[in-house]
């Protein structure tokens, strides 16, 4: 499977302020929440941007144009028993509520989730309109929506920002007339089991 709108190996390497924040500047802050030594799997890790921060990370993705280490749908991927950390970055908007619950139920090691959320109705409206223009089916959530699917984490970090309209031009070839508020949340779990 190839997602042409993602631009393969170029994904996330655009020079707008939102891309720089999401894919580079915020990453060390979120990674500081977890022990990144040992075997690290980056589920939905696409073109392996995370390797700029964790050189030994193993990317798992369904998009062959991004050249992941393991070409597989993360919904079917079985995390090996010797895994020390799973990272899930910017993936949940591709998954239904049930798919998220199923995905985390299969993770038996520590997990770091990095996901954007849209906590205002205005931001949700803009995200849905952009997805419609791009012909994409996405599941945008507020932070409370996300915590309806996940247990409360051991550690949580939030970064609030404004999305630069240039991001959507680079990411989806969609022209957006205004910026909007968004937050990235980092959630660290030692385990999903109770």
Image (tube, helix red, strand yellow):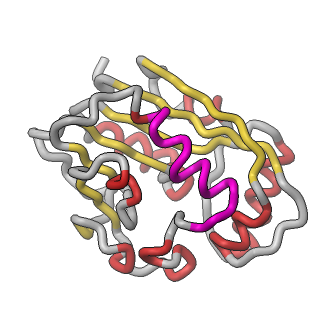
Does the segment drawn in magenta span residue 25?
A: yes
- Report the front residue among 162 and 174: 162
Residue drawn where x is 70% and y is 35% of the image: 160
Residue drawn where x is 38% and y is 80% of the image: 65
Q: Quadrant of residue 61?
A: bottom left
Q: Position of residue 60 (x, y in %)?
A: 29, 60
Does the segment drawn in magenta span residue 52?
A: no
- Report the front residue among 97 and 181: 181
On screen, residue 34 versus residue 175, left or right, reads left
Q: Can you say whether 29 is above or below 27 in the image?
A: above
What secondary structure is the magenta-colored segment mainly? Answer: helix
In the image as oriented, which residue stretches furthest toward the left?
82
Residue drawn where x is 44% and y is 38% of the image: 113
Q: Quadrant of residue 46?
A: bottom left
On screen, residue 188 versus residue 29, left or right, reads left
Which contiguous range is marked in magenta?
Answer: 14-30
On screen, residue 12 versus residue 120, left or right, reads left
Q: Position of residue 98 (x, y in %)?
A: 45, 46
Q: Position of residue 13 (x, y in %)?
A: 53, 66
Q: Can you say whether 175 is above or below 157 in the image?
A: below
Q: Can you say whether 59 is above or below 158 in the image?
A: below
Look at the image and tell me in which quarter the N terminus lies: bottom left
């Amino acid at each position: 499977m190839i997602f042409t709108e993602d631009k393969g190996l170029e994904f996330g390497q655009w020079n707008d302020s939102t891309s720089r924040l999401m894919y580079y500047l915020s990453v060390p802050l979120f990674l500081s929440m977890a022990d990144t030594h040992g075997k690290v799997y980056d589920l939905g890790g696409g073109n392996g941007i995370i390797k700029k921060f964790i050189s030994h990370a193993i990317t798992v993705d369904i998009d062959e144009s991004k050249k992941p280490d393991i070409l597989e749908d993360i919904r079917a991927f079985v995390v090996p028993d010797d895994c020390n950390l799973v990272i899930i970055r910017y993936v949940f908007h591709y998954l239904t509520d049930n798919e998220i619950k199923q995905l985390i139920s299969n993770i038996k090691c520590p997990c770091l989730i990095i996901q954007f959320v849209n906590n205002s109705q205005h931001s949700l409206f803009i995200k849905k309109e952009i997805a419609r223009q791009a012909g994409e089916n996405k599941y945008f959530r507020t932070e409370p929506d996300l915590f309806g699917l996940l247990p409360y984490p051991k550690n949580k970090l939030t970064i609030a920002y404004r999305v630069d309209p240039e991001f959507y031009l680079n990411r989806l070839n969609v022209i957006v007339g205004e910026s909007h508020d968004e937050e990235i949340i980092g959630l660290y779990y030692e385990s999903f089991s109770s």
